Image: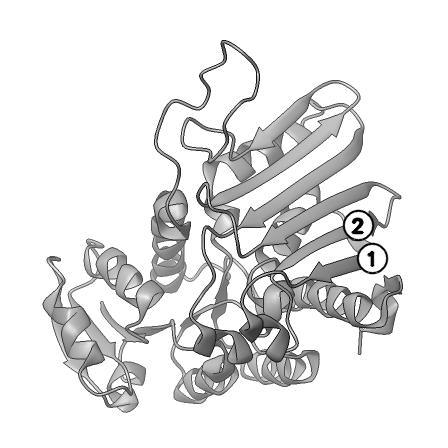
Amino acid sequence: MRIGLIGAGRIGASHAEVVGGHPDVDELVVTDTLPGRAEAAAARLEVPAHVRATERLDDAFAADAVLIAAPTDTHAELILRGVRAGVPVFCEKPVALDVGETLRVRDAVTAARAFVHIGFQRRFDAGYAAARDALATGALGELHRVHMLTCDPAPPPAAYVPTSGGVFRDMLIHDFDALRWVTGREVAEVIALGANRGAAFFRDAGDADTVALLLRLADDTLVTVQGSRYNGAGYDVRMELAGTADTRVVGLTTHSPLTSAEPGTDFPEGPPWPDFWARFAPAYRAEVAAFLAAVTGGAPSPCTVDEALEALYVAEAADRSRRECRPVRLEEVRK
């Protein structure tokens, strides 16, 4: 296979290693509109596939499939370009920065019967899959409580924030998707609070650097979610599901950035996760493998635009709740 990769930034360069090293990939075309960035990313690769760098996006869309890891505000148009070219598309989340644009993409994908996969790598993480199975098989009993958190060790660059979509669409949308995927239940209502005690560029962009949410699921299960751009101990992503029979915690490992205050307790023993790729590298590899297998084998998309839209609805409700200081039901943001 020949795969086109659009975007040679941090996550794009990491994807290049994974895609280029896949046994079914013979050629990887790395593209980026910034002069020299595709070449720099290609030069760092030591992968079996033949690697070619270019600034021409047409070269990527001439491949057998395309992977989009470009800035968030370009996702929608790049997906649509792939649909028009008749090329299977893998695009990192989110589809777009708002519901209207996401619906436009969804309608185009549906009309063309195109293959589009949206990247939510936690669906391919062993811990989330195990928690999902434990709930589905009844090992947890009746689910009563869920707690989730995503905390970055340090804020992103200031230039990234205004085009990111904000903390709910950019960071916690992973939690919203994982919540739906693991529990099989929909969010009915959101209450969100935000704070800015760090760099001024978050406030200047209308964003928050730390947030806390209370979600009510359709079956009345309560879910708490926390997010922060300032977690000096390391990269921390966890999900706790408590039921009448047992509790499961995703992300509680020897690399969790936690220090017990209890005397005589040495957990965790290993170094903390430094970033998202170190924590989720096996999930990213599994996700890319599932995408390529679906493309070659004719299987359906591992995560459709419709699934991504549902997570975006929760992010939209959270953002509205934070801005208007009130509970927001999902019906208010659905179109």
Verify CB contact (< 8 Å) between mark 1 and mark 2. yes
- Rendered residue at 69%/65% (across/down): 315
| Depth order, front residue of 83/244 | 244
Whether residue 182 is visible to the viewer of this picture, yes or no, is no
Label 2 Cα neighbours within 10 Å, binned few <14 / some 14-19 / many ≥20: some
Residue 147 horizontal side relative to residue 45, left or right: right
User: Toward which corner of the image does residue 137 lie, by quadrant?
Assistant: top right
User: Toward which corner of the image does residue 326 lie, by quadrant?
Assistant: bottom right
Secondary structure beneath label 2: strand
Q: Which residue type does callout 1 highlight?
A: Ile
Considering only vertical position in the picture, is 149 above or below 199? above
Q: Identify residue for label 1.
A: 191
- For marks 1 and 2 on the same chain, the one whose residue lies earlier in the sequence: 1
Q: Identify residue for label 2.
A: 214
Considering only vertical position in the picture, is 292 above or below 246? below
Q: Which residue type does callout 2 highlight?
A: Leu
